[in-house]
Image: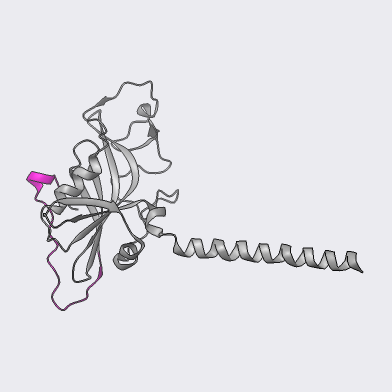
Amino acid sequence: MRRILTFIFSFLIAVGITIYSKNKNQIENTNRSPASQAEWKTFSKNNLNEVVTHQTTKEEYIKAKIPTPLQFSEDNHRQPSSLAPSSFLSRNNRKLMGNVDAKYADNDTKLEMINTVSPDWKELMGNDLMRFQSAETKIMVREDAPLIKLEDGKGRFVEQVTITFLMATGTTNSFKALVDSESGRILETWDKTIHEKIHEHREVFILPDVNESGIVTR
């Protein structure tokens, strides 16, 4: 009898531990910020009108209604026309795009690069974009893919990103962009989407002009 009671007691303890662990994981997954999983960064201005950055919070992520980032897909749907068609060729762990020549997929083939990769490209881009915004505006950025753009037999390191503007009114604007990996200049934008219009009058969506930030929309 004692052995049976011991077995039942041990079984109940084991079941309790299992349920506790499962509930704990569910709570942690609920509280975990989707922004941190997606590696979003938020740019804003402080009281001194200086541009500062932080990891996007869960509240910012939800409020901005951030779209699902564009993914490379084998069926070639929903990809900007400038990207290389499937199957993608790569070099130095970066996808090739532009006027792609298969020979450049071989890392031993010489390819003249017109820029380098700066660890500060995202901060440079964020600072450039925030200069034209009010103190209440936030800009949220996610890295989608590192690329090499081929032009006239030369290569340029670029970053494909998703950029979301969160206005003080609650209005959000989002678009995709190619960014120079050295200077942080925006080279090209597409897929501009207005996700929510809170007020009757839309807040002005300001971007740097072409001369200063190299923005070209299509």
Residue 184 at least partly seen = yes
Q: Residue drawn at (15%, 72%), measured in percent from left and top?
A: 202
Against 78, residue 112 (above or below) is above
Please state the horizontal and vertical placement of residue 96, each as a whole percent of the image.
34, 36
Quadrant of the drawing holding the N terminus: bottom right
Please tell me in which quadrant of the rendered image residue 107 appears: top left
Q: Quadrant of residue 193?
A: bottom left
**216 over 22 or under it: above or below:** above
Residue at (37% x, 44% y) in the render: 85
Residue 146 lies, in percent from the top left, at 33, 40
- Extreme-bottom residue of the structure: 200
Residue closest to the eye, 77 or 142: 142
The one of 161 and 99 positioned closer to us in this rendering: 161
Give yes or no for residue 204 being in the magenta stretch. Answer: yes
What residue is drawn where x is 20% and y is 51%?
A: 52
Q: Is residue 81 visible?
A: no
Residue 49 inside the magenta-drawn segment? no
- Number of labels in the image equals 0
Figure colour scheme? one colour
Q: Position of residue 89 (x, y in %)?
A: 40, 36
Nearest the eye: 77 or 187: 187
Q: Which quarter of the picture shows residue 138?
A: bottom left
| Residue at figure coordinates x 14%, y 48% from the top left | 128
Position of 27 relative to 89 (above/below): below
Give coordinates of residue 33: x percent, y percent. Answer: 40, 59
What's the magenta region? 194-216
Residue placed furthest toward the front: 2
In the image: residue 76, left or right of residue 25: left
Magenta: main secondary structure equals: loop
